[in-house]
Amino acid sequence: MDRKKIIVMLTALMMAVGGYFYFDRAESAVEEPPSELKLSGNVDVREVSLAFRQSDRIAEIFVEEGDPVVEGQRLARLDSRELELQIARARTQIRAQEIVVRRLHNGTRPEDIAQYEAKVRAAQSDLADVEQHYRRIQDVYDETQGSAITREELTTARLQYNNRLAKVEEAQQALNLAVAGPRVEDIDEAEAQLQSLEDELARLEFLLTQYELIAPTNGVIRSRLLEVGDMASASAPVFKISLNDKKWVRAYVKETDLSRVFEGQAAQIFIDGMPGRALDGQIGYISSTAEFTPKTVQTDELRTSLLYEIRVYVVDAENILRLGMPATVRVALR
């Protein structure tokens, strides 16, 4: 056998052996699906856009981008001078109305009643004088049958008498009202006015609390969107805060692997900056609709295909993960 035939036979043998191992491994791969799913994705975080409820000019800002904040911390303040003047005016009106209510509850003072009684006596004294004058004129008119006193003089005297009589009645009614004191309806009306003023003061004081922007939870200032002197409004956020609660990694699963992942399934997250350390997480969301491969997703095989979005939630107690950071997710398949 010559050298050429030997080379051909050895080549054929090597190809046969290689083909056997190739198909054997391929069959094994079909028979034994992978026990772990490796996905690539990016970190996402919850954010809150904070805006003032009231519209006014920003007076102070107390934090910068990147500052950690805690729940209840003051972040910024509006110019509240006009509102404070309104509150001062409301308090003055309340004090005045409280005096009115207190006076009505206390009733008429003895000194005031004595003054009304004096007015009644003075009116009665005037009435007595006028009545005496009227009676004398009336008697003269009757005796002389109108020759000594004219009818016009008699009429004038009668009008003066009736006028003084009306003044006595008026003074007596005023005395009766003073002795009786204020009506229940008057007291109720004054108290209702006082309550209305107090309600308005409470409203203004609540609005004053809205002139400060307070952190709703722990987090980090991610963006500072307005500055001192800018006009704030409910539609203009001042800050964006990244919250410190659960973060997640947004990744995508092929349709062929979709049946092997489920909500609550344990997963591990790895980042390039800490290659040997894993963060524990779990799958919390699986999309019900497929989409084309996003440009931000990098897989071993870059091709257009339908994928399903999943979110792997992770507790980042040390605040390691950052928005948009690339991450690798490893999921132990069932």
Image (tube, grey):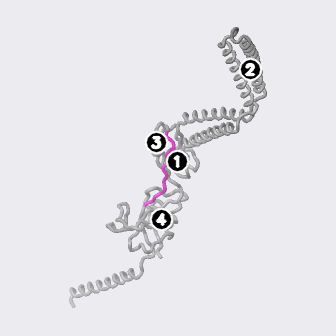
Q: Amino acid at mark 2?
A: Ala
Amino acid under disc 4? Val
Horizontal relation, residue 180 to residue 193: left or right: right
Of tags 4 and 1, which is closer to the observer? Answer: 4
Looking at the rendering, the stretch of residues picked out in magenta corresponds to 42-55
Q: Residues within 10 Å of mark 3 (few under 14, many from 20)?
A: some
Q: Which residue is mark 1?
A: 67
Q: Earlier in the sequence, mark 2 or mark 1?
A: 1
- Residue sitting nearer the eye, 84 or 260: 84
Q: CB of mark 4 within 8 Å of CB of mark 1?
A: no
Which quarter of the figure is the N terminus placed in?
Answer: bottom left
Residue 100: x and y in percent read 68, 33
Name the side, left or right, on which 314 lies relative to 18.
right
Taking the image as shown, residue 119 lies to the left or right of residue 247, namely right
Q: Please name the amino acid that badge 3 sits on.
A: Leu
Instruction: Answer with mark 4 or mark 2, whichever residue precedes in sequence.
Output: 2
N-terminal of the pair, mark 4 or mark 1, is 1
User: Circle 3 — which element?
Assistant: loop
Q: Which residue is mark 4?
A: 312
Q: Around disc 2, counting alpha carbons within 10 Å, would you say few (fewer than 14), some (14 to 19), or many (20 or more)?
A: many
Task: Give the label, 3 or 4, closer to the camera.
Answer: 3
Mark 4, mark 2: which one is toward the viewer?
A: 2
Q: Amino acid at mark 1?
A: Asp
Residue that carries the numbered disc 2 in the rendered image: 123
Q: Residue at x 53, y 36 (%)?
A: 79
- Spatial CA distance of label 1 from label 3 is 16 Å
Mark 3 vs mark 2: which is more N-terminal?
2
